[in-house]
Amino acid sequence: MESYKIVLPEADLPAAWYNIQPDLPRPLPPYLHPATGRPVTPEDLAAIFPPELIRQEMSQEREIPIPEAVREIYRLWRPTPLRRAVRLEQALSTPARIYYKDESVSPAGSHKPNTSVPQAYYNRIAGIQRLATETGAGQWGSALALACNFFGLECTVYMVKVSYQQKPYRRSLMQIWGAEVLASPTERTQAGRRILAETPDTPGSLGIAISEAVEDAATHEDTNYSLGSVLNHVMLHQTVIGLETKKQLALAGETPDVLIGCVGGGSNFAGLVFPFVPDKLKGQNLRLVAVEPTACPTLTRGAYAYDFGDTVGLTPLMLMHTLGHGFVPPGIHAGGLRYHGDSPLVCLLVHEKVIEARAYPQTPVFEAARFFARCEGVVPAPETAHAVKAAIDEAIRCREENRPEVIVFNFSGHGFLDLAAYDAFLAGRLEDVEFPEAELRRSLADLPKVPRAD
Ligand SMILES: Cc1ncc(COP(=O)(O)O)c(C=O)c1O
């Protein structure tokens, strides 16, 4: 009899996160200070991050223990199930075996609490009272609101304006957990006021919201900043996903051929694949596939260059694939994938050809999501649907090549609070947007002038 889900006992919850930094094919180039261009020091980051997260950001230790207070909260929903998509396989008549790691079972409905919980914890023990953050789709904001609630911290969320309008129920969720939610750009920060003066009807962007949250944290002693993706410590916390998946695949007697995740800033993808990267570097035949929207094609069409993480230029410069920090992506429905940059760790591995990247327009992505929902029941978040589409395409390739490969993808979140986007799809109102080449060139012309190390 086929197993439909592989579950681990709570005792198998990982005791340590996996830090990929010592195993990279070459060292990660340092972040650079936005004003001096010199490598960032821990002291530079201390205005907005607590000491332990700064240490983790730069750590070369392969294993970093997960504090008991964090594991205790993880246990509310972890270990998450690894599900076999038997009915999807049958519908596709594929010889492939398709598995998905179900991160949608967290209270916030996505993988994001894997990092919001430790971030809130480390800030709490450092004596911080309030966290400021940005959110795109609202998934990250709700995950941080949840974590702040558990550790008795206040939470201010700058929510990208277009998502604030499209996703009112994500806002309700954040408010239930006690957060203050603002439509970004706001009049509350200098960065927001500047952008509103220039473009009063801007839909907002993650880059703008990050500028606002960083400024809020930097100008208030009791407040720190919290980022839901991109940074090394976020990738680190998400590795619980891949560590559990490894154990679950071993229990099922499977060795993966293809691992797939969607990429906004890179965290759910990294969380699934990083623990498998050493196997690939040692020669295992394993493909790692990162999926993004054609409307925000950071990995597939961006430059690999130093750039700011935000729009205004307050954050350190990071070597990453970027569409330029001034890039404001069209208001596609996968709000969590609308970011101009990506995790420097993920980008380094794309640049070194350890990870491959591909992009899809949103209509075929929603078609794949509907097909998946009709087979498996669960409705994926629009971001997750990008991974679903790639998994289906890989399974079809396996059918054409008659190869019984093992395909594993990260089911990063459910779409119950994204039904407005599904309504637009069902009504035929989705537009497939490509990012125009001329606009990309214009945006990249504004990259800060920093010589690249490689
Ligand atoms: C469900 C879901 N998946 C994926 C993402 C993309 O983020 P990341 O690339 O950091 O996993 C988001 C971001 O909001 C999300 O909400």
Image (cartoon, rainbow, N blue to C red):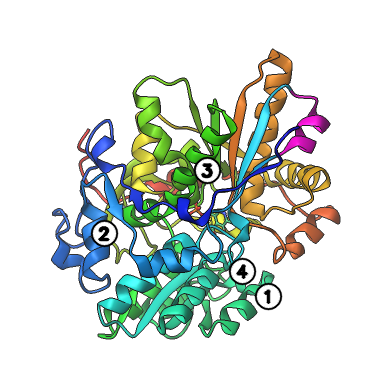
Q: Which mark is residue 162?
A: 4
Q: Would residue 107 appear left or right of 348 to someone viewing this image?
A: right
In the image shown, does 386 or 241 lie closer to the viewer? 241
Say if mark 4 contacts mark 2, CB within 8 Å.
Answer: no
Q: Which quadrant is home to the C terminus?
A: top left
Residue 383: x and y in percent read 61, 52
Farthest right residue? 427
Could you tell me if residue 397 is visible in this image?
yes
Give the distance between the C-alpha atoms of the residues marked 1 and 4, in whole angstroms.
14 Å
- Which badge, 4 or 2, comes first in the chain's sequence? 4
Q: Residue at x 37, y 35 (%)?
A: 349
Q: Nearer the viewer, mark 1 or mark 3?
A: 1
Distance (Cα) linking label 3 and label 4:
19 Å
The secondary element bearing badge 4 is classed as: helix
- Disc 2 marks a residue whose amino acid type is Pro
Over which residues does the magenta segment extend? 85-94
Q: Which quarter is ligand 1 in?
A: bottom right
Q: Which residue is mark 1?
A: 169
- Please rate how many residues cluster around mark 4, counting C-alpha atoms within 10 Å: few if below 14, some from 14 to 19, many from 20: many
Residue 353 appears in the figure: no
Q: From the image, tell me which residue sits under label 3.
A: 297
| N-term mark: 3 or 4 | 4
Q: Which residue is mark 2?
A: 316
Q: For marks 1 and 2, give the CA distance.
A: 33 Å
Amino acid type at mark 4:
Val
Q: Quadrant of residue 125?
A: bottom left
Residue 312 position in % (x across, y down): 35, 66
